[in-house]
Amino acid sequence: MKIAFLTEYTHLGGGETNLLNLAYELNKYNDVVIFCNGEVKATAKDKSIKTIEFITTKKWIKFFPLISFNMDLRRILNTFDIVHAYSVNVLPYLFFLKPRIVWTTHGFWEHPNGLRSMVIDKIVDKVVCVSSDVYRIANFKFSKKMIIFLGVNLNIKRKIEEVDFDGICLKLVCIGRFQRIKGQDILLDAIIKFAKSHSYLKIYLSIVGDVNGKDKEDIKYKSEIYDKAQNISNKNIEIAFEGFRANVSDYIEKSHFVIIPSRYESFSMVAIEALSCGKPIIAPNIGGLMDIVNSDNIGLLFEPGSVVSLVETLEEAVKNYKNFNKENSLKRAKFFSIENQAKQHMLLYKSMIND
């Protein structure tokens, strides 16, 4: 089967990493090409996935698509069996193509509802939602939309480093790009408040990630987080900014908890990485995290955006640390494997072609 993926994004975020891993898995038994640019293109090349140079800009004015009839692009795309859009701004290129068209929607910021969804409905044959929350938001007929959870490359068979909690040193890790929606400011405020009532604890927090691209708001936000951390006077708090790291599992394995302080997450690749390392998660009760954390012995959920709720949840997690079950975390992680995601996509593609 010939499958074309298209994405507008050039930097390696969670969605782009998932696209590359999915394409790699499907490419084992199919002919896969990614239309992309930048870091995504370079990484695809490293994975021996074929690419075609593709650059685009914003293609929507609210609900109105800026339709693009790039004849060379259309000629190439019409040679595929499936054309799979992995971002919203590639959709205006796909009007009236011969192949079956799939769109994966990752969250509310793509506006998969209202008048825009009515337009998208005319372009695509199937809408894949990455979580139950995105499925709820996406305003399409039940017959047109479905849920396929994102998957990760699991390496569960490796020996996982045991980090016992001795009641004296607490090791936390937060992984994600610097962006206000990711909530690093909420985490710092919560850590400061938590430390005041737990003076006997030495708290080590590793913040892994950086700014994607040159967005001025994100750069400003990163600066605010740095300033906030530098102004913490409590000597029991030690914060390390680790920058971008390709292999985050090293940081996860050395921690007691993986904290996801986001104001919203349509899914969370970090949460699955944590589970695959057997580590408990502290995360907001919102979006895709409600699909992932299905038991309080693999993680705890707090009220999104609430410093007080995060502090209370962290207190509960520390108090009941021995209740978390590593084997249950590993078992849950297997449900979100990249192999499982690829299998579900193949079933979808085949059903569309045979329809």
Image (cartoon, rainbow, N blue to C red):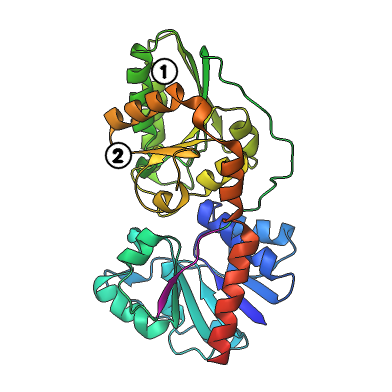
Tell me, yes or no, whether the highlighted magenta stretch contains residue 42. Answer: no
- Crowd around label 2: few <14 · some 14–19 · many ≥20 (10 Å): some
Foreground mark, 1 or 2, reads: 2
Q: Which residues are magenta?
A: 144-150
Residue 299 screen position, x and y as percent? 46, 38
Residue occupying image coordinates x 69% and y 45%:
156
Please tell me which residue lies in front, 70 or 257.
257
Disc 2 secondary structure class: loop
| Residue holding disc 1 | 230
Residue 91 screen position, x and y as percent? 43, 75
Residue occupying image coordinates x 55% and y 47%:
272
Q: Indicate the amino acid at tag 1.
A: Gln
- On screen, 167 above or below 211? above
| Residue holding disc 2 | 303
Q: Is residue 244 left or right of residue 301?
A: right
Image quadrant in which you'd find residue 192: top left
Image quadrant in which you'd find residue 69: bottom left
- Crowd around label 1: few <14 · some 14–19 · many ≥20 (10 Å): few
- Does the image show residue 230? yes
Residue 282 screen position, x and y as percent? 43, 36
Residue occupying image coordinates x 56% and y 40%:
274
- On screen, 39 above or below 112? above
Disc 1 secondary structure class: helix
Q: Is residue 164 left or right of residue 136?
A: right
Residue 4 screen position, x and y as percent? 60, 76
Q: Quadrant of the N terminus?
A: bottom right
